């Protein structure tokens, strides 16, 4: 019986890098796949994208405890798309067949 491949999700969320899950401070992926988690080329774009997305959350503004700045996300979408593309390209480059990539962000961002 074949082992099931692990799914690596590309998903933006507050205090996370797009490689689900990640350490936003270091950009280190926390997937449990050594090939990904120890790849230094993934860390910087993963860190930048995570910090950028988290910056869209504003606290105690707009008469709300937490407000998401959709206009800022839209204005910076090309930068984010480039970072996501770098991450996906690197994941594809190092993929040894043990995982599949599920990109949940590229189409969403393009539609902004």
Image (cartoon, rainbow, N blue to C red):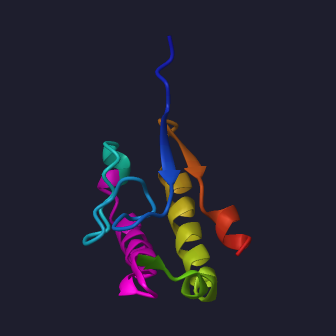
* Left or right of residue 95, residue 75 in this image: right
Is residue 53 covered in magenta?
yes
Residue stretch in magenta:
37-65
Which quadrant of the structure image shows residue 19?
bottom left
Q: Compared to 90, does 5 lie above or below? A: above
Name the one closer to the observer, 111 or 10: 111
Q: Compared to 45, does 76 lie above or below? A: below
* Residue at the extreme right of the image, as rendered: 111
Which quadrant of the structure image shows residue 43?
bottom left
Q: Residue at x 41, y 68 (%)?
A: 46
Is residue 84 covered in magenta?
no
Q: Residue 39, position in %: x, y?
A: 34, 59
Q: Residue at x 63, y 83 (%)?
A: 74
Q: Residue at x 56, y 47 (%)?
A: 101
Q: Residue at x 43, y 85 (%)?
A: 63
Q: Residue 51, position in %: x, y?
A: 37, 77
Name the one closer to the observer, 3 or 93: 3
Which quadrant of the structure image shows residue 88?
bottom right
């Amino acid at each position: 019986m074949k082992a099931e491949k692990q799914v690596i999700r590309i998903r933006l969320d507050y205090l996370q890098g797009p490689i689900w899950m990640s350490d936003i401070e270091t950009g280190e992926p926390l997937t449990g796949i050594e090939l990904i988690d120890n790849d230094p080329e993934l860390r910087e774009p993963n860190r930048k994208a995570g910090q950028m997305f988290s910056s869209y959350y504003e606290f105690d503004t707009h008469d709300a405890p937490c407000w998401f700045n959709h206009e800022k996300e839209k204005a910076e979408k090309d930068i984010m798309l480039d970072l996501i593309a770098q991450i996906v390209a690197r994941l594809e480059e190092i993929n040894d067949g043990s995982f599949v990539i599920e990109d949940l962000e590229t189409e969403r961002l393009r539609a902004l």
